[in-house]
Amino acid sequence: MSIEQALQTFTAECRELLHEMEDALLAGCKGNMSADSINAVFRAAHTIKGSAGLFGLDHIVGFTHVAESVLDAVRAGQLPFTPELIELMLSCRDHMARLVDEVAAGHLDEDPALADAGQPLRQRLAAYLDDEPAQPVVAAAAAAADSADGAGHWHISLRFGSDVLRNGMDPLSFLRYLSTLGSVLHVAPVLDTVPTLDRLDAEACYLGLELALHSSAGLAAIEGAFEFVRDDCRLRIVAPGSPPAAYRALAEEFPEERETMACLLRECGSWPAEDTVTGTADGAPCADLALEAEAADSARPRERRSQEKNSVRVDADKLDHLINLVGELIVATAGANLAARRAQNVELQEYGATLNSLVEDVRNSALQLRMVKIGSTFTRFRRVVHDVARDLGKDIELAIDGEDTELDKTVVEKIADPLTHLVRNAIDHGIEPAALRLERGKPAHGTIWLNAYHDSGTVVIEVGDDGGGLQRERLLAKAIERGIVEEGRHLSDAEVYALIFEPGFSTAEQVTNLSGRGVGMDVVKRNITALRGTIQIDSTPGVGTTMRVRLPLTLAIIDGFQVAVGGSVFVVPLEMVEECVEFRTDDGHDYTNLRGTVLPFIRLRELFALDGAAPSRQSLVVVRYAGQRAGLVVDGLLGESQTVIKPLGKVFRHMRCISGSSILGSGDVALILDVPSLIHQAAGDHARLIQPSESAFA
Amino acid sequence: MNLTSYPDGEGRLSIHFEGDLTIYEAAQVRESLLALLDGAGAVELDLAEVGEIDSAGLQLLLATALTLAANGGSLCLARASAAVAEAIGLLGLGRRLPITSLA
């Protein structure tokens, strides 16, 4: 592990911790600050400080230390965790996040601008500390160690693995860090394994340490100092007041140098010069500590390690490469199967079928690797809701549902921004002021909810609010004023609501600093469209609005249904195919009777202006998307196949009704049909029969 | 890292270090030291011009002391920069690597 990799681990870990810290603080805002959450906040700050210390990131250590000191006072019950303090801690968390981001960007030294930004926070934190016995910032930890609350004599025994130095760790930095936890009383180096120069590997580590530390820090904190070398060193910690037996056991661990060890332990003042029973005078309460220390020695690292084994961090690029290869594999298998069929070799075809199902399994598990739960994206909105609601002076609760719904990592990453916008919009425009809410007989605090679920091969994400709902008349008036819609046109509710996604469209009477400038919603729509998704609005005046975003599960490979029109092959995403029926009634209409319901349809031959006359027997593929159905008239049905989506080139970007292309086993290109826009088209054509006008939303 | 050596007239070899003494330089310094110390007895290291030092650097000093002792020689640190003195103090190596004077 190089220093860069170690830093990457550091920043990733910090971000996780900052996330936990934020969650705990936000829970605190809601008034349920349990001892657990206080501990979680403290632990996060503490661990970040410790890890930063290992990398010599003094500015992070410095800032975090002040926050930690305040948190420590809170934890000890000396300071109440007031809402103001929680807000301050949230700001501190954000500052720490910025510091960590700087490090992640490769700037290890403090950015002066950020230092200035941190100064007011430091002062506000210091104000809390002033109420306590004044402590100089740097010496605070040491001073705490001297206080009566359980400061004691810890003995730490360390044997570093030979790769420690190569991994960018330095025993010196551990010592430097330990001295921030308390005072290092004595260091006895263990140098027995240091060889002469000719046998020395200059980059290997031969060092060991026995050291005594006077500190009030807990076992976890001291252990935490060695977080990064845990797997690479032999660490034994003997808690204060442990009976001599604990030290004897420690010495026994090094049978060949037992005497030396005993010497070193005495040197550190950890083990009384004569190993007598005097030490057990207060042995009873100490036995637990010793046990705790022992448990930590063995059980905890093991537990942690077994957890680590359950998951592997993999570079996203490697996954992408794997998916690409699986894509190629699918194409190659299709080619092989085709060849087998042509050769009319039964045995070959059987193998081909087996291979096909295996490849399908491989594809599914490869895609599964990229699936992540949307929950972490959702919880991020707790903060957004908290901040925005505070800025606007509204009392808003966030309800989250369906956080276990999984979708492709790329999709999750790209959907976060549009969702943020929708949530902000819901808070700003959706939820009415408290007074108005009470007038309408609603609870004073508004509710925003996020929900996610799977629906016919897509993921649906809902952002809802129980606010005033969209005002149809005002939207329409505005649209007419802006010249987006002609006066006198009849639009369906969905069409009117969709107006808010038009560029430069805003009905907000007041422009707040959050939204209402009319930029944003059109960008949201564009981003979602770029993900091959759609957005739909349901709104009831006075009751609320729900924005429904539909996204494909994955961006790379789909189960396709191949259909033929003339000499061309088209692929319909299988999840959207409802059924296939024989198409007979070609009486010139664009709709047919499907078991008693009207089904609009599209003739693909006409739509894509394909040559050749329609055969006598045609088929109708019934597709469904977002609750709407339409039929596609095709010449023949070719069956299911796995389809690797290749994006269309820039030249074809504006093509409607085609979402991508795919290479068939024969080497031919098949176009993938864009079912949502086909359905729109069919519905539009259908609507035109009733009211001839160009649909603005196709 | 620059090493310059000269006999100090009393049969001792004096080696002057200049630069950093960290894991990045360790392998190269080891080579240089091996060459310089071949057959040497008493050696004096002048570490006044050492910028940074880490555990790898300290290990090198320890190994040098051991090598010399094995050949019946001895090592002394004539002068040490603040960084070197601090590192030796932190690791508790004062007894193994006594410094005769600070830079």
Image (cartoon, coloured by chain):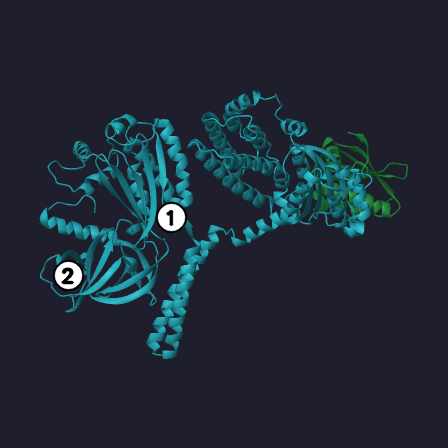
Chain colours: A cyan, B green
Residue A358 position (above or below residue A525)? below
| Mark linked to residue A411 | 1
Q: Is residue A519 above or below residue A257?
A: above
At horizontal 77% and vertical 36% (from top left) the residue drawn is A269
Q: Chain of mark 2?
A: A
Disc 2 marks which residue? Answer: A595
Label 2 or label 1, whichever comes before in sequence order: 1
Mark 1 Cα shell of 10 Å, populated few (<14), some (14-19), many (≥20): many
User: Crowding near pointer 2: few (<14 within 10 Å), some, many (20+)?
Assistant: few
Q: Position of residue A570 (x, y in %)?
A: 26, 61
A159 or A485, which lies in front?
A159
Q: Which residue is located at x 51 percent, y 28 percent? A: A114
Residue A314 placed where, x, y %?
A: 50, 52
Q: Nearer the viewer, residue A476 or A454?
A: A454
* Vertical relation: A70 (above or below) A251: above
Coordinates of residue A130 in the picture (x, y in percent): 57, 20
Assign a secondary structure to mark 1.
helix
Q: Position of residue B101 (x, y in %)?
A: 81, 30
Residue A535 in view here: yes
Tell me which amino acid carries mark 1: Val
Which amino acid, by three-letter code, is at mark 2? Arg
Q: Is residue A167 visible?
A: no
What residue is drawn where x is 17% and y is 57%? A602
The chain letter for the residue carrying disc 1 is A
Cα separation between marks 2 and 1: 38 Å
Which of the 4 quarters of the picture holds residue A639? bottom left
